[in-house]
Image (cartoon, rainbow, N blue to C red):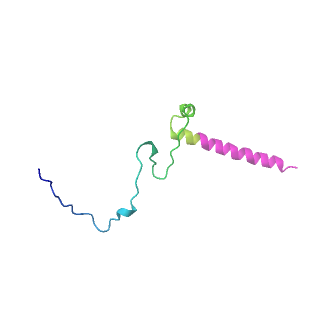
Amino acid sequence: MKKDKTTTQDELRSEYDLKSLQVRKMGSERKQFGKYVIQLEPDVAEVFPDAVSVNEALRFLIRITKESSEISSDIGSDD
């Protein structure tokens, strides 16, 4: 049986720079563009049905922490 000797011609245009391409991971290690993937522990994941609810809870926690620290600093400056 003869081996088929095929020649491959490069049909890409010269303006395509393949050196600048990045390899993307597949599966659970794959990240989306500009977003972080965070894995929640199972007990925490049961409480939050989706990313929106997690972000809402974290923003609430950030806000009350800031407000609490402002109140504490105001009380401390009354001396």
**Residue that lies at the very extreme toward the right in this rendered image:** 79
> Left of 50 or right of it: where is 23?
left
> Left of 42 or right of it: where is 9?
left
Q: Residue at x 74, y 46 (%)?
A: 69
Magenta-tinted stretch: 57-79
Location of residue 51 in the rendering, given as x and y in whole percent from the top left corner? 51, 40
Q: Camera-side residue: 9 or 3?
A: 3
Query: Quick check: 42 above or below 35?
Result: above
Location of residue 21 in the rendering, given as x and y in whole percent from the top left corner? 38, 59
> Left of 23 or right of it: where is 61?
right
Location of residue 22 in the rendering, given as x and y in whole percent from the top left corner? 41, 57
Magenta stretch contains residue 35: no
Q: Camera-side residue: 47 or 8?
A: 8
> Left of 70 or right of it: where is 50?
left
Q: Residue at x 69, y 44 (%)?
A: 65
Snapshot quadrant of residue 56: top right
Name the chief secondary structure element in magenta: helix
Query: Quick check: 10 above or below 48?
Result: below
